[in-house]
Image: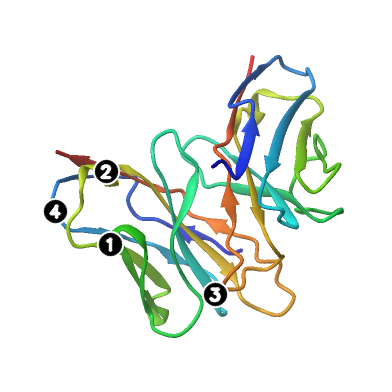
Amino acid sequence: AQSVSQHNHHVILSEAASLELGCNYSYGGTVNLFWYVQYPGQHLQLLLKYFSGDPLVKGIKGFEAEFIKSKFSFNLRKPSVQWSDTAEYFCAVTPNYGGSQGNLIFGKGTKLSVKP
Amino acid sequence: DAMVIQNPRYQVTQFGKPVTLSCSQTLNHNVMYWYQQKSSQAPKLLFHYYDKDFNNEADTPDNFQSRRPNTSFCFLDIRSPGLGDAAMYLCATSSQLGLRYDNEQFFGPGTRLTVL
């Protein structure tokens, strides 16, 4: 079965620290990859997505992610976090094959707390 | 402007008492999804509608039903809620099935269901 693993349940950083959140998936075929963010009390919002092309994807708010096919990974990075980045981050995968209904498979999420 | 609206945000019901959760959208999207998210777990797709066509996930319990009377509204009915059904229920929409580059899913804020 397809699965998505996020290695860290809760990450605590100080402002200006660099961030890297891990995401690995188990599906062996071609995949589309996503990072969603959920700020406290708000809905899930798309941060960035990878479909094809350059494996380094730039998203909103200074986030980026790198798709490394050989490692089945799609780690999220930000060089310098801010207090406003405090949120829960979800990695999600969908298989990209003919007839796919594009169902999202989510990881369990990583809570990021940024100390001012 | 709210795009995917869920009501109520918090719902309390009694064991075995039917409950209905509501989702509406202002995006005029063809597809509406319902996800269940239990504490510290990944969101899990229950079912989706493409227009009036209903698609149930294979492992969604029969206790969960859905209705989509028109493009804008979709309801989640839990016929006999058990304690294990306490969760956050997320509604999402996309313009088409499959996740092509311009067809991301837009999420509502969720309804937190408590079963007493």
Task: Please tell me how crowded label 4 is: few (under 14), some (14-19), or many (20+) other residues with Cα within 10 Å.
Answer: some
Which residue was labeled with disc 2?
A84
Are the two marked residues, 2 and 1, in contact with CB atoms closer than 8 angstroms? no
> Who's the residue at 71% across and 14% down the image?
B14
Q: Which amino acid does label 2 sit on?
A: Ser
Q: Do the residues labelled 2 and 3 touch (CB within 8 Å)?
A: no
Tell whether label 1 touches label 3 (CB within 8 Å).
no
Q: Nearer the viewer, residue B31 or B36?
A: B31
Mark sitting earlier along the chain (3/1): 3
Percent position of residue B114, x then y: 61, 21
The Cα–Cα distance between marks 1 and 4, rounded to whole angstroms, is 13 Å
**What residue type is disc 3 on?**
Val
Q: Residue furthest bottom?
A: A53
Name the mark on residue A31. Answer: 3
Identity of the residue drawn at 39% across and 84% down: A54
Instruction: Name the secondary structure under disc 3.
Output: strand
Q: Distance between the residues labelled 3 and 1?
A: 24 Å
| Dot in front, 4 or 2 | 2
Please, is residue A86 above or below residue A48 in the view? Answer: above
